[in-house]
Amino acid sequence: MIRLDHVTKTYKGSVVALRDISLEILKGEFVFLVGSSGSGKSTFIKLLLKDENPDRGDIWVAGKNLNQLKSWRVPALRRELGCVFQDFKLLDNKTVGENVAFALEVIGKPRQVITRTVPEVLELVGLSHKLDAKPTELSGGEQQRVSIARAFVNRPRILLCDEPTGNLDPTTSVGIMKLLDRINRTGTTVVMATHDQHIVDSMRRRVVELSNGTLVRDQSRGVYGYGS
Amino acid sequence: MGPRWRYLFGEVGTGLRRNLLMTVATIVTVTVSLAVLGAGAWTHFQVRKAQQVLYAQVEISMFLADDISPEQRTSIESDLVENPLVEQVIYESKEQAYENARQIFANDPELLEALRRDALPASFRVKLVDPRQFDVVASAFEGYPGIEEVVDQREILGPFFDIMDRVRDGAIAVALLQLAAAAALISNTIRLTAFARREQTGIMKLVGATNWYIRLPFMLEGITAGLIGSLIAGGLLIAADVLLLSGVKDQVDFFPFLTTAEMVRIIPILVLTGVLVASLASFLSLRRFLDV
């Protein structure tokens, strides 16, 4: 589902964000991407989205070689990926329902599909009753659920999460993780960048650790760090 | 209306309202520039039409002496007819000249009052196969007994047309400067809109909306401003024709003015220019400010 082959990414000013990363993530896997701030986790996610391009090495996502992907084909790639961020990225002037529907509207889905799938996915994240609420009226955990609903509403093959619990308290985070786990069980590949040690340790899933842009550990059913 | 269209029109409306002042400034600038361009186009087409009509009417006038004998006249006429450079010869007697003048100045009774019946000379109106051969024909007939003067009618009109052409060039130059200002305003409006909507466009890119889908509301915003401006400019042009020019047209009825219908045909040129400049300005600034 995702494969990186000797991928190196350097930003302007010669900061090496990722150094010679090779990695394969299979369909349906749940992978934690761990490491301290600046270790290259966000760059990793941006490369998978083709928001950034690598200096060297090949990346395959959902069967596409990103180096050979024409720029006009990038939207098609992103329709197979769902994205969840630490800051939710919801539009405050739209209701919960409209925020989720927006993701379908702008890729030209017909109205019948939108009116059917939006309530379905809100049901999945447990926010059916908040359909007409504005994001500002919701708690952080609820906002992140809306964000996950929006990422998942088009049934992507891969869900990319960049610090999804970064702004949430531990109890709320557990709820979000349960939701991501449920989504993973539908066959969706989940890649989650985090430095939340408790979550990683309690889930016991595959852990990939980056340190200063280098892959230092790839462990199935791992924990956050050797010390814990 | 599907979600796609509702989204599009909603976005265009919101954008235009959000930057109302900028939008008004843009439309006014587009209007002024295209009105000036319209004036330039009017001058151009007016000169072309006048040249066509007036040059077809007259080319050379050979004014005859009042004391010309009938033999001299016949000999000039037969020489003219036999000349291979001459296409057509029309004789205009003193009476016909007077009648023609009466028609041309029908609206100017004072002038007619002063015009004596025998004031105008008789003449031959000569149409050449190639009007540029004037000098050859003129020198051949100048000094003929009975010919008072050979006049190239084109030379009378020439300076007038030259001035009109310069007016046209000036108008187009001013219009181009104004259009550049309009393009800058459109570009600036789009930059503001792009900034105001950066969250939304960011999400759109993320969920896989195509670049054209993201661009379209912005482009339509610019194009709407261009379209409205060009239509107002067209309206101003017609208003100027009806309100200002119609009086002159009645007074000077020998001059082939453009009809209102012919002026309406300038409007598509304005609309096309306005929309084209607006699309181009929008497209280029989007690439810069929106990165799509």
Image: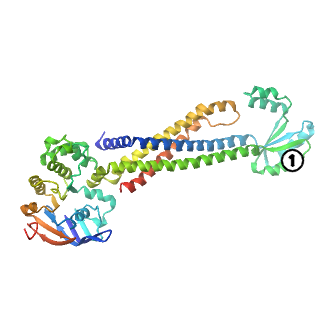
> In the figure, residue A197 lies in which quadrant?
bottom left
Q: Which residue is depicted at the point 75% across and 30% down?
A: B105
Nearest the eye: A129 or A119: A129
Q: Secondary structure at mark 1?
A: helix
> In the figure, residue B23 lies in which quadrant?
top left
Rendered location of residue A176, percent (x, y):
12, 53
The answer to whether B30 appears left or right of A160 in the picture is: right
Q: Disc 1 is attached to a residue of which chain?
A: B
Above or below residue B209? Residue B89 is above
Q: Which residue is depicted at the point 10% across and 60% down?
A: A199
Quadrant where the image shows the N terminus of chain A: bottom left
Which colour assignment does the render follow? rainbow
Rendered location of residue B36, percent (x, y):
56, 43
Q: Which residue is depicted at the point 54% across and 36% down?
A: B236
Which residue position holds label 1? B141
Nearest the eye: B245 or B33: B33
Above or below residue A78? Residue B162 is above
The answer to whether B177 appears left or right of B247 in the picture is: left
Above or below residue A125? Residue A18 is below
Q: Badge 1: how crowded within 10 Å, few (<14), some, or many (20+)?
A: some
> In the figure, residue B98 lies in which quadrant?
top right
Number of marks present in the image shown: 1
The answer to whether A150 appears left or right of A203 in the picture is: right
- Residue A91 in view: yes
Nearest the eye: A152 or A208: A208
- Residue B224 in view: no
Quadrant where the image shows the C terminus of chain A: bottom left
Name the residue type under label 1: Phe
Q: Which residue is depicted at the point 12% across and 48% down?
A: A124
